[in-house]
Image (cartoon, rainbow, N blue to C red):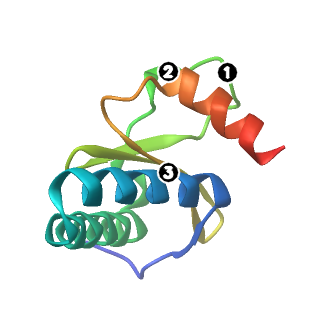
Amino acid sequence: MAGPLLNYRILPTARIGIDEVRSYVVRTFGWETWRQTSAQLQETIRHIRQFPASGHAPVELEGLFEDGFLQVISGKNRIIYRVRDDTVFVHLVVDVRRDLPSLLQRVVLRLM
């Protein structure tokens, strides 16, 4: 049985990823495909808010950070998040084909 929706925050690192996904999808497939992709991402985040334990630990993050990061697949993207108290923190939105360790390094440098 589903509980109430948790609060959520899209962190700056996730916004960077969303911007990059949007740019790629619009350039390659057009605005209609982006609208579909965006709707799918929003629906996946709603699912996470309702069922926060539904994700699984990303293998690439094991040993790099403290435990607690989970991921779910949304189309050709993955959403990496953590749950703290009553809030889902979305840390990354990234194409499943991207090399996650390299991307993390680039995102961290970009935020500095």
Between 80 and 102, the one nearer to me in the picture: 102
Q: Nearer the viewer, mark 2 or mark 3?
A: 3
Q: Position of residue 108 (x, y in %)?
A: 73, 37
State the residue position of label 1.
Answer: 64
| Residue furthest to the front | 27
Q: Identity of the amino acid at label 1?
A: Leu
Location of the C terminus by quadrant is: top right
Left or right: residue 99 versus residue 110 is left
Q: Marks 1 and 2: CB-CB under 8 Å? A: yes
Inspect the image, locate mark 3, and give the three-letter code of the amino acid beneath it: Gly
Between disc 1 and disc 3, the foreground one is: 3
As drawn, the residue found furthest toward the bottom would be: 4
Residue carrying label 3: 17
- Identify which amino acid the numbered label 2 is placed on: Glu
- Residue 88 is left or right of residue 75, and the answer is right
Q: Distance between the residues labelled 1 and 2?
A: 8 Å
Between the residue at mark 2 and the residue at mark 3, the CA separation in whole angstroms equals: 17 Å
Quick check: marks 2 and 3 in contact, CB under 8 Å?
no
Is disc 1 placed on a helix, strand or loop?
Answer: loop
**Which quadrant of the rendered structure holds the N terminus?**
bottom left
Quadrant in the rendering for residue 35: bottom left
Give the residue at x 30% y 74%.
Answer: 2
Q: Name the residue under label 2.
A: 60
Q: Where is residue 97 in the image (x, y as percent from the top left)?
A: 31, 29
Q: Which residue is drawn at 16% across and 64% down?
A: 33
Classify 38 as above or below 81: below
